[in-house]
Amino acid sequence: VSQFEEVPREDGACVVRVSGEVDLAVAAEFQEQVRGCLTRSARVELDLGGLTFIDSSGLGSLVLLQKEAAQQAKSLVLVNVNARVSRLLEVTGLQHTFDIRSPQG
Amino acid sequence: VTDTARPAGRPGRLVASICVLGLALTGLAAWAALHADRNTERRLLETQTRQAAAVLSTAVLTIQQPMVGALDVQASAGPGGRAEAFTERFARNVGPKAMFTSASVWRRDGRTFTRTASLGTAPGLAGDSAAMQGFLRHAATSKTSVVRRVDVGRRTRIAYGLGDAETGFVVYAERAIPANRRAPVDKDSAYSQLDYAIYLGRTTATSAMTTTDVDPASLPLTGVTARESIPFGDSVLTLVTRPRHHLGSALGQRLPLILLLGGVLLTGIATLVGRKLIGARDRAEKDTATITTLYKRVDALFGEQRDLFVRLQQALLPQANPDLPGIEIATRYVAGGQGIDIGGDWYSVIGVGEERFGFVVGDVSGHGVDAVAEMARARFTLRAYLVDGYSPQQALEKCSRQFDVATDGHIITALVGVANSRTGEVTVANAGHPAPLLVTDGTPEPVCAPAGPPLGVGESTYQPTSFTMPPRSTLICFTDGLVERRGEDIDEGTRRLADTVAPVVAHPLDEVISEVLDAMRSDDASDDVAVLALRRVDA
């Protein structure tokens, strides 16, 4: 149900297309994938266009990755954030925690 | 494992049954085949013996024929007979290689018989002996030919007499029997497959035996024999036969043995295969039993572990809510329905001074015992700040400096409030938590409490939200496990909750919680839920 597809881009950024559900069951796998990108690229974009559900563990993973990126002086950007996820981030007080942009912005 | 083990004797008995049944069937089949073969043998022997008897009858006729001819010649010649006619015409029947060794014609002369012509060797019986005269008298008066045995030294002869009572002529002839009385049989004759013994008369005493193909000392023939009587003059010839070898088909003879050996072999194979199969089945059953037992144990261990975690969770939740005048309190924690994944949801109500009290509903991300431990830390830290008199936003801000997802592995959402039990004034601060529902005059409305970041994100600031609970109004605080549903917007869950609460909010507060939980949660919901409800009542 969940898929994290890594798509390299010419400008050196690493794009991870997140689709399906990100919950407790896949949180560790998700973190590993994105962490791998963070070690290779200075800029990692998480494309959340295909994200259908994210629970508190998923949100925790996003926060953790955000903090790790900041610590390494790298940027973690959320792109293609749909209305449902956007509302969820607002309700959970995380809308200012992340760098949310339109694609390649 | 032992409770499903089979009694040790049962497979053994089953294998023994297979063996016994197989052998019994084998024996039965072999016996039937043997019986059928014996019947066939007896029938074939009787048939062949009848054929042999028919051949013997023909031979008897062959012997009598020349004697009848000779008697006719003498009778037609008149009272004196014709001695030269007899010697002339009968000579070819007499000689060492001919049918008879001796032949003669006798004529009654008053009381005695006088020989008128003779051929070959001297008769075994002397002409004037009482035995000869008696035999001739008997022949003259008998309607058939007469036969008797005559012993000449060690040799035996058969004497034949054929007489004519009217004319008084008697033709007498003797036939030699081989010294050992043995006559080998021709391959193509009716006797080719038989051992035989021919007796003169109805007795089968060896002394009465005239011809046989076996050693006379071994007589009488034993085993399966057949017997036929052939008329022979005034006596009979008794033919006793025994098959020289198996008369029927070779298969018929061997079938019983083939069936016996085949049956025993098959029974042996069936027994071995049966033992193997039963052994394999027993092993499979034992394996299944072991696996089932292991599963049960694992299940029991999981159950115990889950019970332990739930007890830990319950122990870390408040044992009792404070008694506050003018405020009715109801709280509930429900663990996730499956597995051992207990969560880190909690509620807390704390008396702070005379009319003031604090309350918290929170949720640690993730599951398991470390989530519960993190919950305990968050609960007691917030409680300490509230007891110290800090406002909700101050308590959260202080906490935000002490929790870090990078070290703790969890983020924590929490709704923290401080209220006046007399006036109903409430101030809340929200760290990423679902907004509570305020039900006034039966109408539920989400409290607009803008959320700051969850604990664990880092040092944050929070906005206080103040409102007043009207008398008899109800404030319902909850964790996302109550409203969260995959594939649904978060606000839809909140609306469903409002729709569920509205018709039941007038019920006793504890019942309201029960009814809401029943309606909102399915039995297999994986997430845990904490609910805290406050109602203003008359003091």
Image (cartoon, coloured by chain):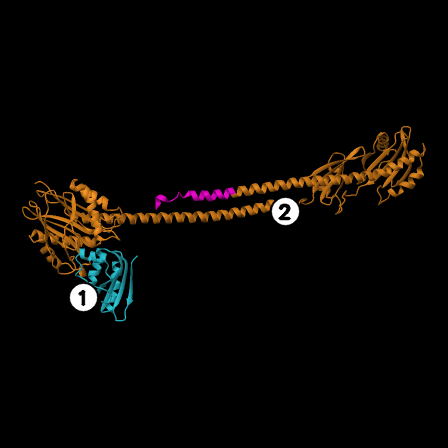
Chain colours: A cyan, B orange
Query: Residue at left 20%, top 61%?
Result: A64
Query: Residue at left 27%, top 63%?
Result: A17
Residue B410 appears in which quarter of the rendering?
Answer: bottom left
Residue A60, above or below B166: below
The residue furthest left is B354
Label 2 resides on the chain identified as: B
Q: Quick one: SS at disc 1?
A: helix
Majority secondary structure of magenta residues: helix
Magenta span? B1-21
Is the residue marked by circle 1 packed among few (<14), some (14-19), or many (20+) residues within 10 Å? few
The reply to whether the magenta stretch includes residue B5 is yes
Where's residue B392, x and y in %? 10, 53
The quadrant of the image that shows the C terminus of chain B is top left
Task: Tell whether B245 sits left or right of B365.
Answer: right
Label 1 resides on the chain identified as: A
Cβ–Cβ under 8 Å for marks 2 and 1? no
Residue B39 appears in which quarter of the rendering?
Answer: top right
User: Which kind of residue does numbered mark 2 sit on?
Assistant: Leu
Which residue is under mark 1? A70
Where's residue B467, x and y in %? 10, 49
Q: Quick one: SS at disc 2?
A: helix
Which residue is under mark 2? B251
Where's residue A59, x and y in %? 21, 58
User: Which residue is nearer to you in this view: B417 or B238?
Assistant: B417
In the rendered image, residues at marks 2 and 1 fall on the same chain: no
The reply to whether the magenta stretch includes residue B362 is no
Task: Tell whether B205 sits left or right of B363.
Answer: right
User: Which kind of residue does numbered mark 1 sit on?
Assistant: Ala
